[in-house]
Image: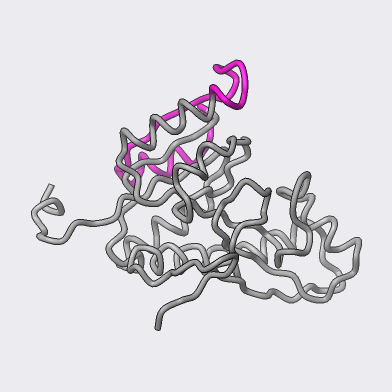
Amino acid sequence: MAEDMHPHKYKKIVVLVSGGGTNLQALIDAQKRGELGNGRITCVISSKPDAYALVRAKNNSIPTRVIQRKAFPDTAAYSAAMLEAFYEEYADLIVQAGFMTILDETICRAYPNKMMNVHPALIPSFCGKGYYGLHVHEAALEKGVKVTGATVHFVTEVCDGGPIILQKAVAVKQDDTPETLQKRVMEEAEWKILPQAVRLFCEGKLKVRGSKVYIKE
């Protein structure tokens, strides 16, 4: 590949998926527009063999792996297999993009501030255990918030508790359903700030001090 001829080494991004892969698509589109800096998506790993995200990867000539949760007796064994895959792929950055399977703390210890996740709410609202997918938007509507949004954060041992990289607010409309809100949050926030956060990481512009992320100008 001609890309390997470049003198500068690009950052290898491994994306973890479980489902449709709309956030993966946002990253692929950003990469095609040259918006991931010197980052390249070099592998997509799915926890499910029938995830549509795998089709998106193949359509864009990105190598894929399937590491199925049910093939392993417990979280520890599954996490060990994932970690091995990350090492084999020489991952510089790991992005959880709609990845619905629990990994244990060995992963974030091996990749401190090198693993990011996108969450469909403004953390610390509507986050933590049980808040995933449509549940997040159902909770936001039930609470009657006027503003929600998305958060990209580094992954730590605390569920949705890692240092916040970027956030973007999205208005809640009075006639919203969980589905219409989910769609708006994806389109207006998730698909914008996830590629941005990845680019900032790949450009070396993110510095973590304590629990805060500082973005270098």
Residue at image position (59%, 50%) is 156
Does the magenta portion include 214?
no
Q: Image check: 48 left or right of 35?
A: right
Which residues, given as a range, are shown in magenta?
Answer: 49-77
Residue at image position (57%, 25%) is 76
Residue 23 appears at what percent x and percent y? 52, 54
- Give whichever of 105, 121 is nearer the camera: 105
Question: Where 95 sits versus 7, above or below?
Answer: above
Residue 62 location, quadrant: top left
Q: Image check: 24 left or right of 178?
A: left
Residue 113 appears at what percent x and percent y? 48, 56
Q: Image check: 162 left or right of 192?
A: right
Q: Is residue 187 visible?
A: no
Does the magenta portion include 58?
yes
Residue at image position (29%, 43%) is 61
Question: Where 151 sits versus 64, above or below?
Answer: below
Question: Where 42 sits versus 140, above or below?
Answer: above
Q: Residue furthest bottom?
A: 217
Question: Where 100 sits versus 142, above or below?
Answer: above
How does the figure colour the protein chain or chains?
Answer: one colour
Residue at image position (54%, 22%) is 77
Residue 119 appears at what percent x and percent y? 64, 57
- Give whichever of 110, 88 is nearer the camera: 110
Residue 137 appears at what percent x and percent y? 78, 58
**Total labels drawn:** 0
Q: Is residue 176 visible?
A: yes
Instruction: Look at the image and tell me in which quarter the C terminus lies.
Output: bottom left
